[in-house]
Image (cartoon, grey):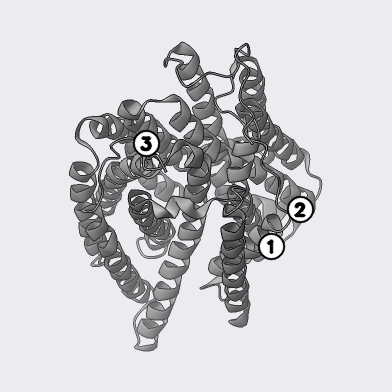
Amino acid sequence: MSAPARPTDPAVPTASTPEGTGHRSIIAILLVAAFVVILNETTMNVALANIMNDFHVTERTAQWLTTAFMLTMAVVIPITGWLLERMPTRVVFTLAMALFNAGTLIAAIAPTFALLLVGRIVQASGTAVMMPLLMTTIMHLVPPQARGQMMGNISMVISVAPAVGPTLSGVLLQFGSWRYIFAFVLPIAVAILVLGRLKLRNANEPRAIPLDGWSIPLTILAFGPLIYGLSLIGDPSAPFWEPMLAIGIGVAGLIGFAARQFVLRARDQAFLDLRAFTFGSFTVALLMMAIGMMALFGTIIMLPLLLQRVYGLDPIQVGLMMLPGGIAMGVIGPIVGRLYDRVGPRPLVVPASFVVLGVFVFFAFLTPTTPWWLVMIGHMLMSASFAFTFTPLFTVALGSLPKRLYSHGSALIGTIQQVAGAAGTALFVTVFAMQSEAAAARGASTGAAMLAGSHWAFLGAGAVWTAAVVAGFFLRRPAEEPAH
């Protein structure tokens, strides 16, 4: 049963409410909140060495600050489909930011590594809710002819925040402890929470959907082990059986989760409604997005490794080299969004996908004498091309769905991003490690062996990306909201 908004309630806009200052302020608050929580995702990478020294833990133990964050995101994001259907926008926003603030405070004052890890998990719980909330709210408030520009703003947040995170951490670590990172973020996040409570209006009409007792444990069983297993592939300290067992459990859990959703769908009570996949444009866009995330995350892992180990650059130099690409991707996002509103997806996505393919081929033939600035230009070209790809894909995917599936579509996009990112990293690392070891066994030097491994990794990425190039020709702009 739907719970319609009362006509006298000014906090809930009706479908006929014109877009105006109120709507823009809602989206602006959510965009800033999303930027802050996503910025936090990548701040830990630079600080791990300092944390290891302070708490006297090993590198593998410290890495759990990143792994646990990723695992929590993967488990919580599927739950947001139900959450966004069941609760008003303001309540979901308050929950997300309250969790993020609580986790940030715990991490800032944590006296032990275990408590720091708890803080990161609580942070991740809030972060996981924010992006689906932002995308679903935009779909509810923004008319179809203006969604491209708004999705471009989302692309800017997704691109610039992770790129700025390591640089911000590096600057703060110059002044003192890793705790400064959390101390810097906390007052900003608290201010956003207060502002949101004062200014935010509800943008949805909640429905009284019961919480299924089987779906949550199946979500944990599916996405937790799957992401964990993928993250272990290529880790020399993990026994071979550990990632294989985790992935096997995850796949079994995923099958059980999907079967359960089909049962619930018959009652119109799906925890994560998989009917979104029956819309062809959504499925094609999501497929391209998954391949793009695999390629992007794999490259983010591979390039810094090569720049440090083969070209001898310092970490700060590598961070500065990677920063322009992330900023370019973010700056171009809103521009691409406006172009999408005029010309649709294919004129943007198809040429950009060929440029990405060309960059992968270029990276596959790097040599020890390749100038560092040429590598940086290649990364910038790839990042800019991904901006021309991801913004239209977000818009096509959600625009292909009926309104009742917006929240579920947003949750599916977030889930696929997490799984694809972990899978891309695992693919790159595995191919790279195998081919590097083979080259070293043939007598190649360390640098030459690493380059040989990277050649095959980038060629593999190019081969996988070819599927995205082909899929781009099948993209089309959603004409209007589907009726079924």
Instruction: Pick the quarter of the image with the C terminus.
Output: top left
Q: How crowded is mark 2: few (under 14 residues within 10 Å), some or many (20 or more)?
A: some
- Along the line of sight, which residue is nearer the eye, 270 or 284? 270
Q: How far apart are marks 3 and 2 (CA)?
A: 49 Å
Q: In front: mark 1 or mark 3?
A: 3
**Residue 25 screen position, x and y as percent:** 50, 17
Q: Which amino acid does label 2 sit on?
A: Phe
Q: Do the residues labelled 1 and 2 touch (CB within 8 Å)?
A: yes
Q: Which of marks 3 and 2 is nearer the N terminus?
A: 2
Rendered position, 254 above or below 70: below
Q: Residue at label 1? A: 61
Task: Indicate the quadrant where residue 444 lies.
Answer: bottom left
Whether tag 3 and tag 2 are in contact, CB under 8 A, the answer is: no
- In the image, residue 170 above or below residue 146: below
Q: Is residue 370 visible?
A: no
Q: Which residue is drawn at 39% across and 78% down?
A: 436
**Viewer-proximal residue among 329 and 216:** 216
Marks 1 and 3, Cα distance to the nearest angstrom? 48 Å
Q: Badge 2 is on which residue? A: 113
Q: Is mark 3 on a helix, strand or loop?
A: loop
Q: Mark 3 points at which residue?
A: 481
Q: Say which element carries label 2.
A: helix
Specify whether 48 is left or right of 345.
right
| Residue 386, placed above or below residue 436 | above
What count of labels does the image hold?
3
Q: In this view, does 412 lie to the left or right of 299?
A: right
Task: Give amino acid for label 1.
Answer: Thr
Q: Nearer the viewer, mark 3 or mark 2?
A: 3
Are there few (<14), some (14-19), or many (20+) residues within 10 Å of tag 1? few
